[in-house]
């Protein structure tokens, strides 16, 4: 079965799993190591202070690694995810699975949950995906939610007004608490699916199952009415108390700055299922893994909207420098002079949190930020190619805007070359190179890297 361990085995074979033998504390030290190695290998912490369990982090910390986990090239990501969201497949529910090796009372304080940053109010679970269903069972949903541990059996979680929020709203008045499972230690396909903007009513477990070629298996929880992946490392069995709130945060979100404190529901944890030798999956807030998992599913949606305007989109990049959320580059082949601004409008509608977008011609790789800047330098003219949309909804995470009203300004940059001018004026000069010289240059590049 595809699970976190089988994927880590693949990473090990490829030399992409770094083992750390030094004992590190879950309070700050592991987070500091993950930050130092961000965008690099996945990291296995073999000795975690105060715990018999190992921790692993950075598993989804690179775009190419996430795509490899799905068995695809990066260019195929958008179509693959959109196809899975359009074709969810029902998932096998099995009697037993590795995650049921131990079923016990919750002792959250004994789990190696990381405290990441200086002003964090306590340890935060950041890699957990939460399954919930409506009280009548007609709607199922799976999504990521950060969880602040308050005691052995109590926690709170952040619920952004989306699908889980709607399920909670609709359940109020019918029930006092909503049964939920929170699963950690998962194959990347499950994490991508849980972060995807599938329509309300579509279970992201079913999206994951399509991404995994039918390889997902679910088990029933022991103490509550919920499902969870049979091959997870850990499952918390909980109940969201719909009438009880507490303070959540401050928490470092995508921007790397502290998000505000809010009143959020209390999560009562009533049981835990886990593998006997479970691995604790860490995920560094504002690290590349957080940004990619948030951003890549939105890129698929942006790609879809942009493709509706021009069927020649080369790629979409919610850039890491733009927090994987606020800045986007779209590369496409322009046919008409008006295409870029229409693409910019489509991109802003596809992802309402977006603040700045740049559109470039198809000869510019949207993932090569030096080339993107070169396109702005050589193809953009501020008085004609700038789109400014004031007083519009932006992300609540954008500190430069009105974060309470979520009101701000969007700026679009058309860095495509004007069709009326000769193409040669905007093309980079090439140096003719023979096949033999190419081989030599390749070696030269390698020796340059080593030196
Ligand atoms: C690592 C990570 C952490 C996230 N944390 C939260 C969170 O704390 N609260 C939240 O509401 N959404 C969070 N999200 C975003 C949701 O998972 C995402 O928006 C998802 O699409 C929402 O699911 P839904 O479409 O079923 O509502 C997080 C996403 C990732 C990848």
Image: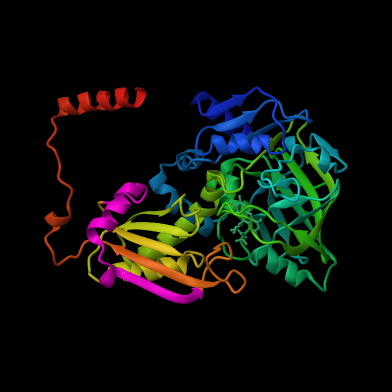
Task: Give coordinates of residue 287: x percent, y percent.
Answer: 56, 45
**Start and end of the magenta stretch?**
364-392
In-front residue for pair 434/286:
286
Looking at the rendered image, the quarter that the C terminus falls into is top left
**Rendering quarter of residue 318:** bottom left
Task: Give coordinates of residue 246: x percent, y percent.
Answer: 80, 61
Please say whether residue 366 is one of the residues in the magenta stretch. yes
Task: Give coordinates of residue 62: x percent, y percent.
Answer: 49, 40
Q: Reply above or below: 125 against 171.
A: above
Task: Tell me how the rendering is colored.
Answer: rainbow
In-front residue for pair 413/334:
413
Q: Reply above or below: 333 against 30.
A: below
Residue at far right of view: 105
Task: Give coordinates of residue 335: x percent, y percent.
Answer: 22, 65
> Is residue 38 visible in this depiction of the protein?
yes
Q: Reply above or below: 5 against 306.
A: above
> Is residue 3 visible in this depiction of the protein?
no
Horizontal side, residue 450 vs residue 401: left or right = left
Badge count: 0
**Rendering quarter of residue 420:** bottom left
Q: Residue at x 29, y 49 (%)?
A: 371
Q: Reply above or below: 151 against 202.
A: above
Q: Quadrant of ligand 1?
A: bottom right
Looking at the rendered image, the quarter that the N terminus falls into is top right
In-front residue for pair 411/83:
411
**Rendering quarter of residue 425:** bottom left
Q: Residue at x 74, y 72 (%)?
A: 170
């Amino acid at each position: 079965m595809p699970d976190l361990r089988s994927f880590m085995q693949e990473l090990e074979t490829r030399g992409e799993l770094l083992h750390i033998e030094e004992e590190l504390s879950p309070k700050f030290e592991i987070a500091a190591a993950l930050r130092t190695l961000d965008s690099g290998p996945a990291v296995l912490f073999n000795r975690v202070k105060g715990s018999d369990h190992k921790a692993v982090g950075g598993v989804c910390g690179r775009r190419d690694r996430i795509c490899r986990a799905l068995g695809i090239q990066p260019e195929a990501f958008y179509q693959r995810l959109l196809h899975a969201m359009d074709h969810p497949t029902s998932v096998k529910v099995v009697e037993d699975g590795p995650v049921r090796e131990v079923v016990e009372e919750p002792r959250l304080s004994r789990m190696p949950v990381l405290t990441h940053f200086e002003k964090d109010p306590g340890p935060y679970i950041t890699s957990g995906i939460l399954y919930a269903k409506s009280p009548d069972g007609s709607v199922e949903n799976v999504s990521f939610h950060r969880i602040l541990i308050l005691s052995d059996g109590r926690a709170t979680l952040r619920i952004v007004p989306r699908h889980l929020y709607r399920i909670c709203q609709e359940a109020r008045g019918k029930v006092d608490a909503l049964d939920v499972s929170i699963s950690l230690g998962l194959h990347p396909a499950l994490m991508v699916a849980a972060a995807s903007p599938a329509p309300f009513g579509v279970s992201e477990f079913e999206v994951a199952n399509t991404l995994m070629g039918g390889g997902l298996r679910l088990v029933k929880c022991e103490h509550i009415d919920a499902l969870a992946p049979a091959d997870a490392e850990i499952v918390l069995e909980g109940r969201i108390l719909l009438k009880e709130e507490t303070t959540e945060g401050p928490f470092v979100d995508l921007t790397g700055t502290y998000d505000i404190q809010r009143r959020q529901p209390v999560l009562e944890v009533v049981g835990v299922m886990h593998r006997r030798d479970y691995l604790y999956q860490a995920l560094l807030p504002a690290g590349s893994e957080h940004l990619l998992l948030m951003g890549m599913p939105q890129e698929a949606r942006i790609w879809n909207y942009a493709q509706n305007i021009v069927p020649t989109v080369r790629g979409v990049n919610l850039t890491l420098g733009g927090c994987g959320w606020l800045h986007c580059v779209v590369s496409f082949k322009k046919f008409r002079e008006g295409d870029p601004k229409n693409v910019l409008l489509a991109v802003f509608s596809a992802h309402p949190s977006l603040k700045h977008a740049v559109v470039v011609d198809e000869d510019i790789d949207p993932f090569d930020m030096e080339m993107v800047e070169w396109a702005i330098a050589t193809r953009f003219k501020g008085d004609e190619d700038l789109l400014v949309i004031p007083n519009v909804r932006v992300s609540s995470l954008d500190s430069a805007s009105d974060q309470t009203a979520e009101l701000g300004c969007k700026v679009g940059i058309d860095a495509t070359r004007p069709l009326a001018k000769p193409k040669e004026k905007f093309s980079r000069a090439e140096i003719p190179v023979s096949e033999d010289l190419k081989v030599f240059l390749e070696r030269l590049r390698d020796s340059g890297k080593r030196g």
